Image (cartoon, rainbow, N blue to C red):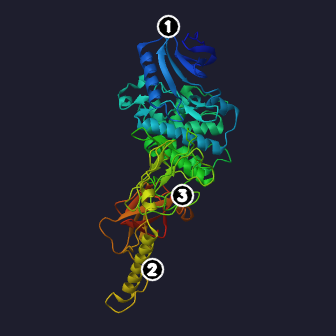
Amino acid sequence: MSTSTPPEIPGLVYVQPVGSGGYADVFLYEQQMPRMNVAVKVLKGEGLTPAIRRQFADEADTMAQLADHPYIVQVFRAETSADGRPYLVMKYYPPPNMAVRARSERFTVEEVLRIGIQLASAVETAHRAGITHRDIKPANVLVSQYGAPGLTDFGIAGRGGAAAEEEADDVGVSVPWAPPEVLFGQSNGDARADVYSLAATLWQLLVGRSPFEVAGGDNSAYALMPRIRSNPVPSTGRADVPVSLERLLGQSMAKDANNRPATALGFARALQEIEQEQRFPRTAIVVLDEQGQTTLADQTPSPVGDEDDRTRVRSPQAVRSAQALPQARPAHPAYPAVSGSTSIPAARHTTVTSAHAGAAGASVPDDVAEEGTIRVDRARAGGVATAPAPGEAPTPADDTARHEISPAMLLTLVGVVVALLAGVALWAVFGRGDGDPVTPTGNKTVAGPGDDSPLDIPEVPTISVKPVIGGVAFSWSYPGAEKGDTFRFRSAATVEAVADAGTSPPLPTSTKVVEVAKGTQVCGEARVVRGGQQTNWSAPRCEKAG
């Protein structure tokens, strides 16, 4: 296939050709400032119709909209050269792409699962933005110099509801990886069609060819189309591919789109379950939410400062300035400082970021503040810990007051405290009116700071569980329920893993549905929260999703 002449682009120096397609060529350029390699995709001059120009502009807009995702190729800018050819300047991914690699090397099951979850993250993010890719295939998956996949070529992507309104002839397809409803004009592509193409791509990474190719046979588009429509999805034939992965790939390439996973996120979660089954390291699902914020879709959200169940430790963050920040002063009630810790017990979480922070003993919350700041969150007991601004000295008022206390006043204060303690003890023994001494009772609660009153819930919740379509439903009950009670919930795949699972935000009702794939086991437990106090966790219960 002929390659056009690379255009002259200000600030870029041409290096060499990278590849050529039906209507565009890709060249490697070196950007002069800052100096780095970039890929430039240039429309060919011949046959440049208004429709192709519009499609090229749509590709630029689409990739720019999704450019922040770690597994989507980033577009830096789109312009027109001096000779009138539109071009895109993109992040450079060195060859070979996944199609070339699949023909020449054998991917492990662990690699394919990881790549599948990462690509499904990218596809789910596109779908949330109203974009259907419609041309997912190994050749459109590039590989960064660090080994991360990058989904590219959104040239025929459908945006919003536009895909359903286009004429079928206007939608180009790559036959070996396209679902039957797209090949035969019943659909112009949707989320389930992208799931099909993604599954076909992973199948090829495992086998080295597309699912319906026949080794040594006729693999033209016209020969492939009836096989894709009628033949069952073949197995990979690899002994190391688990049955669960064979089953998922077959389901995701079902002839009836309704039998496939409904979303790329669902497909990614199913791949994660296979990772867990095979005891592989867990690959995170990274998607953008409706506000454009990056989220880890496979993690249970945890509120800021919810550290009563476990401590999360990240590497210490160093500030740009070499000057250490002043220590935050806790609000009343004051607690004694703990050596080597930046946490103040009165507050739910206090983080001091310092240039002198070391790896040992540094505790940083999940939502770490910007470098060079002190972040103090609201105290559990209702007080607010305050801190001086960076570079501002602490107020001397407290120190001055402390220095004005005379020895006589100190002795008087000690005497008052002793008298109060003696009075409380006498009242506890004789002052209740029934003549009986107080008998300590078991307290099944965990008290918050500054609150020693018992929580009037005699038992921890009793949890019930049942399967529902697409998940597992948990509910719980307990004696003495009161209006205003809230609940915390945590779940995992096994009873042993529940204790280390993330805790949910406060729940207003005593129910929780965990959405997982059919047949997946979920174990969960709950606790009651009232007035800053909480019960112990219930006994965990397990069930498989319906």
Q: Which residue is mark 1?
A: 82
- Secondary structure of the residue carrying tag 1 is loop
| Rendering coords of residue 275 (x, y %) | 59, 50
| Rendering coords of residue 387 (x, y %) | 44, 50
Q: Residues within 10 Å of mark 2 (few under 14, many from 20)?
A: few
Identify the image quadrant of residue 467. bottom left
Marked residue nearer the N-terminal end (1 or 2): 1
Q: Which residue is mark 2?
A: 442
Q: Nearer the viewer, mark 1 or mark 2?
A: 2
Q: Which mark is residue 311?
A: 3
Marked residue nearer the N-terminal end (2 or 3): 3
* Amino acid under disc 1: Ala
On the question of residue 504 being in view, the answer is no
* Amino acid under disc 3: Thr
Q: Residues within 10 Å of mark 1 (few under 14, many from 20)?
A: few
> Which residue is outermost to the bottom?
435
Q: Residues within 10 Å of mark 3 (few under 14, many from 20)?
A: few
The residue located at (44%, 72%) in the rendering is 408
The foreground one among 257 and 411 is 411
* Amino acid under disc 2: Gly
The residue located at (51%, 40%) in the rendering is 120
- Secondary structure of the residue carrying tag 3 is loop
